[in-house]
Image (cartoon, helix red, strand yellow):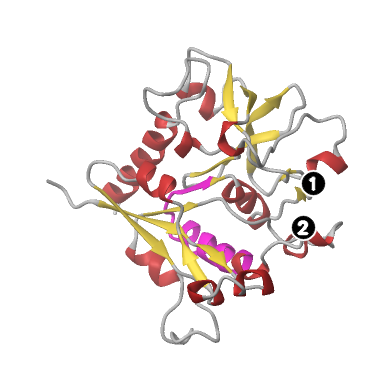
């Protein structure tokens, strides 16, 4: 059997606050963690998953000793998972609302991580926030809040429904996603976001938009390596439990892993 693929997943970061400190215990500390669904989705035959922790200046590991590019050297690919808002200053704006200040610590960490993997020509898949991060890392911007900035758009998030809120997305004809799903032009996807891609980053193209409001739902880099971002959570949408109108996330995962294997064989 060939050596397994080694897939890194960026960490979500819990920052202690006055509210969480009242919970005591581990919640008084900074936490790096993964959502189980994304790890279980990426893990498949002959694939190992690793969480990549942020390396902070005040941490026990000194940046002069270990950098994020060492992970890009050791691992075969990167998944940027979902989570907190991207901070508006990261893409050159001020927060329009105090609730949308985002997580600049995670932004700096993920941009450095992303650039390290892209610099090595290794595949990157972005999910939800990860899609937005790819756009920002290439110099793009975001709508800080769909409801207030695009009042005619449909609702893209319902906290009560979480992953059970769906809307239609249409594939751009001739795009990579359209080729992955040749028998359909649109499908139901989950929607768990209030921010979205605004100005496209350098070298990116749109591969899917929400129906009917045209919000960007998927992007792909036209550069020399595989970089794809999807605004929905395909890790929640796979297997026999999904309805026929819902978009099975398995082809997206297969395309990503095929790109990883191809890149590894070329070394």
**Magenta segment:** 107-126
Q: Is residue 40 left or right of residue 201?
A: left
Is 117 contained in the magenta span? yes
Where disc 1 sits, the SS reads: loop
Q: Position of residue 52 (x, y in %)?
A: 42, 65
Q: Is residue 124 left or right of residue 139?
A: left
| Residue that badge 2 annotates | 100
For the point 79% across and 41% down, the residue is 146
Which mark is drawn over residue 145? 1
Is 251 contained in the magenta span? no
> Of the residues under marks 2 and 1, which one precedes in the sequence?
2
Rendered view: 77 above or below 166: below
Q: What's the CA distance linking mark 2 and mark 1? A: 8 Å
- In depth, the one of 152 and 116 nearer the eye is 152
Look at the numbered discs 2 and 1 and tell me whether their residues touch, using CB distance below 8 Å: yes
For the point 63% across and 40% down, the residue is 192
Quarter holding the C terminus? Answer: bottom left
Q: Position of residue 137 (x, y in %)?
A: 64, 57
Q: Main secondary structure of the magenta part?
A: helix
Q: Residue furthest left?
A: 1
- In depth, the one of 99 and 207 nearer the eye is 99
Rendered view: 267 above or below 128: below
| Disc 1 crowd, CA 10 A, few/some/many (<14, 14-19, 20+) | some
Q: Position of residue 245 (x, y in %)?
A: 53, 16
For the point 58% across and 22% down, the residue is 188
Q: Is residue 108 left or right of residue 252?
A: right
């Amino acid at each position: 059997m060939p050596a397994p693929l080694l897939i890194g997943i960026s960490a979500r970061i819990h920052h202690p606050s006055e509210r969480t400190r009242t919970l005591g215990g581990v919640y008084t500390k900074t936490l790096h963690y993964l959502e189980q669904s994304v790890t279980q989705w990426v893990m498949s035959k002959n694939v190992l998953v690793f969480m990549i922790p942020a390396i902070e200046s005040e941490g026990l590991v000194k940046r002069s000793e270990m950098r994020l590019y060492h992970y890009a050297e050791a691992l075969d690919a990167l998944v940027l998972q979902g989570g907190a808002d991207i901070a508006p200053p990261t893409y050159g704006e001020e927060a329009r609302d105090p609730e949308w200040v985002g997580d600049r610590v995670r932004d700096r960490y993920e941009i450095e991580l992303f650039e390290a993997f892209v610099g090595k020509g290794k595949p990157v898949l972005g999910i939800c926030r990860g899609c937005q991060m790819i756009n920002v890392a290439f110099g793009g911007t975001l709508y800080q809040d769909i409801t207030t900035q695009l009042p005619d758009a449909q609702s893209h998030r319902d906290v009560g429904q979480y992953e059970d809120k769906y809307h239609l997305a249409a594939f751009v004809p001739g795009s990579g996603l359209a080729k992955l799903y040749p028998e359909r032009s649109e499908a139901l996807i989950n929607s768990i976001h209030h921010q979205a891609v605004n100005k496209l980053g350098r070298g990116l193209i749109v591969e899917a938009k929400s129906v009917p409001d045209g919000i960007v739902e998927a992007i792909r880099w036209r550069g020399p390596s595989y970089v794809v971002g999807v605004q929905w959570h395909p890790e929640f949408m796979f297997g026999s439990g999904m309805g026929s109108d819902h978009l099975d996330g398995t082809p997206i995962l297969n395309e990503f892993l095929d790109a990883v294997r191809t890149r590894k064989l070329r070394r």
